[in-house]
Amino acid sequence: MNHLDRNLSGFRELRLPDAKAEYLRQLQDPSTHDLSFDERLCALFDAEFSARSTRRTKRRIKEAGLRITANKEEFSFSHQRGISRTSFAELCSLSFVHGAHNVVIAGASGVGKTYLLHVLGTEAARANLSVRYHRLSSLMELVATKRVEGSYRSFFNLYSRVDLLLIDDFGLSPISIASSRELLDLIDERIGVHSTVIASQYPIANWHALMEDKTVADAILDRVLSDALRVSLTGDFMRQRGDQNLAASPEEEASPTKGVHETQGNRERLRNQSLKIPLGVVAKERIAKEREYPSALRVANKAVLPSAITTSLFELLKFKRTVGPKAKFQRVAKASNKFMFPLIYKS
């Protein structure tokens, strides 16, 4: 066996595929022949380290459950965002993670809360830290599932040791007594040891009212806010300006009018976006009439939605009733009636 075969066999036995690829590249590239032994060896190590780092980061991001690709260089400061470049750089340095501090982020729908969470999660993954991202509702559903499966203890041990836990859409729906107690157990185990970042559409001062159990609410907020860094994001809706990197989360998309940050600009944005929804003939006729005689559907929090959305949903429900099980239709109708019916239309 010659030297080439021995080297290739060694790379294979030591599981160094990228160093092997760099070695073969050097053999075929005459320009590397003038390099010293140390320089060529360093190039082999660099190739292997770089490839392993990239794979590790991708694996960390996948395990974290991050939904979008977020780079700190793409965070927009074109408008007043409520956070300075210095503060943003401090967050991205992850000093709060190393100090086991929490971060709370508040702001209206679409101003960049979810994107900021993903930036922090991506930076932590690149720093070889363990990360988990969840909307609060999906986290509580996961907790319930693990209890039913009998694997709650292993789940709890994992999430209590995660270096950075990202919780999005806090309080988007009322937090039940059971959910608040599950959340308290998790936060109590992490406090002072690992960092938790929580984002919400509601101002921090209103978080207490979002939880049904006020005693547990006191305990949660005391632990989360005692040493937390507070960020209040402001500014225009980024999607309205055409920036895709600061898109809202799925629940914000589904219920964009929930929260206390509603403005006339929000309502105009909703009216414009609703016209892009694929609709049937009846809905298209309603849109034409809507343009001629502006009207609106009012939901519980006084926000305004175009009646075209309601018409489209009504057609969907009729379709469900025709082709789907009756129980499925009833569930869809029950969930939808709360916010979408009755239709108030003035011609």
Image: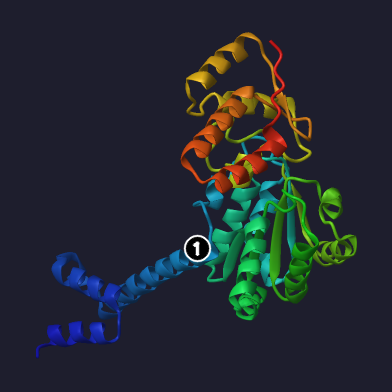
Q: Quickly name the residue at label 1.
A: 61
Residue 108 pos. (x, y %): 72, 40
Query: Measuring 90% from the left and 64% from the top, which residue is drawn there?
Result: 215
Q: Is residue 257 visible?
A: no
Position of residue 161 in the picture relative to residue 324 (left or right)? right
In this rendering, the answer to whether 57 lies above or below 211 is below
Query: Measuring 53% from the left and 61% from the top, which residue is drawn there?
Result: 65
Where is residue 76, by image quadrant? Answer: top right
Figure disc tally: 1
Q: Nearer the viewer, residue 307 or 244?
A: 307
Residue 242 pos. (x, y %): 54, 32
Position of residue 272 in the picture relative to residue 167 (left or right)? left
Q: Nearer the viewer, residue 262 or 164?
A: 262
Position of residue 292 in the picture relative to residue 102 (left or right)? left
Q: Nearer the viewer, residue 178 or 264?
A: 178
Q: Is residue 160 visible?
A: yes
* Image quarter (top left, top right, bottom left or bottom right) of the N terminus: bottom left
Mark 1 crowdedness (10 Å alpha carbons): few <14, some 14-19, many ≥20: many
| Identity, as a three-letter code, of the amino acid under mark 1 | Ile
Query: Measuring 19% from the left and 85% from the top, which residue is drawn there?
Result: 9
In this rendering, the answer to whether 294 lies above or below 262 is above
Q: Residue furthest bottom?
A: 1
In this rendering, the answer to whether 297 lies above or below 235 is above
